[in-house]
Amino acid sequence: MSKGPGLFSDIGKKAKDLLTKDYISDQKLSISTYSDTGVALTSTTVKKGGLSTGDVAAQYKYKNTLIDVKVDTGSNILTTLTLTDIVPSTKTIASMKFPDYSSGKLEAQYFHHHATVTTAVALKQSPAVDLSITLGTPTFSLGAEAGYETATGKLTKYTAGISVRKPDSCAAIILGDKGDTIKASYIHHLDALKRTAAVGEITRRFSTNENTFTVGGSYAVDNLTILKLKLNNHGNLGALLQHEVIPKSLLTISSEFDTKALDKTPRFGVALALKP
C-alpha cells in the first residue's frame, strides 16, 4: 500500500470502478503512438447513435512536469499542466479549456503520511472554491469535502466519508448530496493479482426513501481475458468482456439491459484501444 490516507476521491473508488468502469453504450476506437522525444499521441473516435465525435490528445512528460493537450471535433482545446514536488509532497494542476476562458481551474494537493489536503479554485471573477481533507493511514481514512460559491456565498456541496482498507479488501461509507444520500460499499479481491473480485454497494436516498442495492464482480478467465457482471435490485443487469488482443491493446464488449422489461432493446457498446 502507498503511504498516507490518499485523496478524498479515493474513498470508495475501487468498488465504484468495478461497477462502472469500462461499461459503455457506444462504439469507441482509440489509437496511441509514442515518439522518441517522449510525446504520447492518442486519437479517439466515438460513435453514439448517429453522431460521431473525436479528439486528438498529446501528452509530454519532462522530469516533474506533465503537459496534456486535447483538441476535439468541436474546436475545443483542453490544456492541463501538472507539476509535481515544486514544494516537497505537493502536486499542482492547472487546466484551461479554450475558447471558454472562464473554465480555467487551479488545484493544489498536499500529501502527508497522515493527511491529504486539496484545494481547487476556478479562475474567474467570482470563483468557486473546493476544499477536501483526508486524515488517517493507508489502512484507515476519514475525510470530507466542500464546495463554496463566492458569488452567492453558499455551499454548493458537502460530503463526508470513511474507508477501511486491507491488502485484499476495502470497505467505505460516504454521506453525500448535502446529506441526502448515504452509500456503503465493500470489495473483496479473490486472487493475488486482484483481477478476480466481488463487490456490493447499497445507496439510500433519504428525500425519496429509495434504496438501490448493487452486486457485481470480475473474473479472470485467463491471463488475457476478464469477465465482469453487475445486477441491482431494480433489475438492471450489465455484462462486460475485455480481452487483450495484443500486448497493451484491449477489446471491450459490454451490454446492459432491464430484466423487468425484456421487450426493450438492450444497450451494447464496443471499444478498441490500440497501443504500441
Image (cartoon, rainbow, N blue to C red):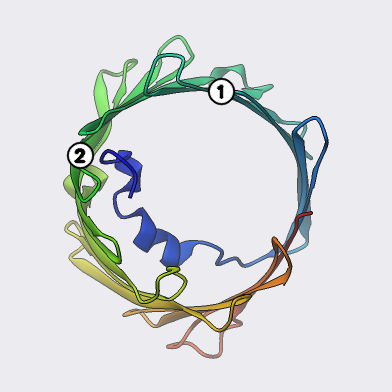
Does residue 236 appear in the picture of this structure?
yes
Query: Is residue 235 shown left or right of residue 159?
Result: right
* Front residue (pair 106, 37): 37
Q: Nearer the viewer, mark 2 or mark 1?
A: 1
Q: Amino acid at mark 2?
A: Gly
CB within 8 Å, label 2 to label 1: no
First of labels 2, 1 by sequence position:
1
* Front residue (pair 32, 229): 32
Query: Is residue 261 shown left or right of residue 37?
Result: left
Question: In the figure, 227 relative to 125: above or below?
Answer: below
Number of marks in picture: 2
Name the image quarter holding residue 62: top right
Query: Is residue 114 shown left or right of residue 268?
Result: left
Q: Residues within 10 Å of mark 1 (few under 14, many from 20)?
A: few
Residue at figure coordinates x 25%, y 24% from the top left: 154
Residue at figure coordinates x 48%, y 15% from the top left: 123
Does residue 240 appear in the picture of this structure?
no
* Front residue (pair 221, 208): 221
What label does residue 64 carry, if any?
Answer: 1
What label does residue 143 carry, if any?
Answer: 2
Q: Residues within 10 Å of mark 2 (few under 14, many from 20)?
A: many
Image coordinates of residue 239 in percent, x first then y, are 53, 79
Q: Amino acid at mark 1?
A: Asn
Image coordinates of residue 204 in percent, x first then y, are 20, 63
Residue at figure coordinates x 30%, y 19% from the top left: 152
Name the image quarter holding residue 234: bottom left
Element assignment for label 1: loop
* Front residue (pair 108, 223): 223
Residue at figure coordinates x 46%, y 14% from the top left: 86
